Image (tube, rainbow, N blue to C red):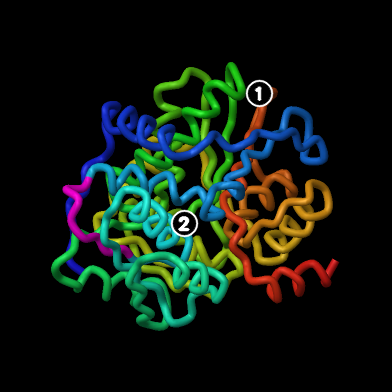
Amino acid sequence: MSERVVAAPQRADLEAAAAVVAAHLVPTPLVPAPALGSGVHLKLETLQPTGSFKVRGALAALARSDGGPVVTASAGNAGLGVAWAASVLGVQATVVVAETASPVKVAALRALPVELIQHGADYDEAEAHALSLEGAAYVSSYNDTGVIAGQSTIGRELDTQIPGAVTVAAPLGGGSLASGLGLWASWRAGARVIGVEAERSVAMSTALSAGRITPVEVGDTLADGLAGNLEPGAVTFELVRDHLTAVVQASEAEIEDAIRFLARAHGIVAEGAGATAVAAALTGRLPRGDEPLVVVVTGRNIALPRLAAVLAEA
C-alpha cells in the first residue's frame, strides 16, 4: 500500500467540524457510573443515529469534500457513518467491508443508500481494495483530517458537560478518536486522554514502542471495530504519540465482562469495541488521580446472537 500524506487537523478544522456536527447531531449523554469508581462517567455514543461515534467524523469529512463521490473502507461503523452522512449531505458513497464483517453492520449498511462492496478476508484487505478504486475520493475511517476533527467533537461536548480537570478513556484502533480527543485535550487545561486497545490488535502500541508504524498480526477479537493494521504514514500515529497520556490493553474476557457490566448496571447495549475502555476501567488499568474520569462507550452494533452468547456466559 503506497503512503498517502494526510495533514494533522488544525484548530480551524476542529471548529469547522464542531459546527457541522452540531448542525446535524444532538450531544450524547454523560451519565454517572459509580460502580466504576468515584467521579466516573460514561459518554454514551451508543445513542448516535448509526449506533456509533463514527458518524461525527463522517459528517466532518464529507462536509470538507467537493461534493463528488467518496469511498471508504470500514469494519462496519465507519461505513455506517459515511452512509448516514452521505444521505444527509447529498453525497454519493461506496463502502467496502471485509467478507467477514459483522452481519448486523452489513445489514444496516444494506438499508442505507450506498454502494456496498464486500471484499477480502479482513479489514486490511478491504482497505487495500477501497484505495485501489478510481473515480471517488477516499475517506479513511481513521487516517483523515476531517474524520479526526469530527471525532474531537466529543471533547467539545465535554467542555459543557463536565468542568475542570478530566481524564477521558476511549477505545483505540486506527486512532481517529484518540487523535481527535488528544488534540482537544491539548487545548483544554487539565485534560488527559488514555487509549485502550484490544489485546489481539495492538498496531498502535506496537508502533509507539518501535517508533514507527509496523505491521502486526491481528487476531480474532470481539472488538472487531478496533481490529486492523495502520495505513503506512498514518497521521494518527504521531497524534497519539504526541497527545495521549497512556495506552493500555483489554483482554477478550475483560471486554466480555464489560459488555455484561454495561447491560446489567446501566441497561446499555455495547459492542466489543464500544466496551473496551469500560473493560480497562473495570480492571483498574486506567491511570488517574482525583479528577473525574469519562469513559467513552463508542458503539452498540453487535449481532443479537453474539450479544446473547456473551450475556449467557455471566
Does the stretch in magenta take in 86?
no
Residue 26, compared with residue 173, is above or below; it is: above
Depth order, front residue of 26/42: 26
Sort mark 2 into few (<14), some (14-19) or many (20+) by Cα contacts within 10 Å.
Answer: many
Depth order, front residue of 236/242: 236
Tell which residue pokes out farthest to the left in this image: 135
Residue pointed to by mark 1: 291
- Using the numbered discs, state the Cα–Cα distance from disc 2 to disc 1 in whole angstroms: 25 Å
Residue 35: quadrant of the picture: top right
Residue 282 percent location from the top left of the image: 74, 48
Residue 11, compared with residue 42, is above or below; it is: above
Residue pointed to by mark 2: 173
Quarter of the figure that contains the N terminus: bottom left
Callout 2 amino acid: Gly
Residue 23 is tagged as: none
Q: Which residue is drawn at 59% across and 31% down?
A: 167
| Residue stretch in magenta | 65-72
Sort mark 1 into few (<14), some (14-19) or many (20+) by Cα contacts within 10 Å.
Answer: some
Q: Residue at x 46, y 38 (%)?
A: 244
Does the stretch in magenta take in 68?
yes
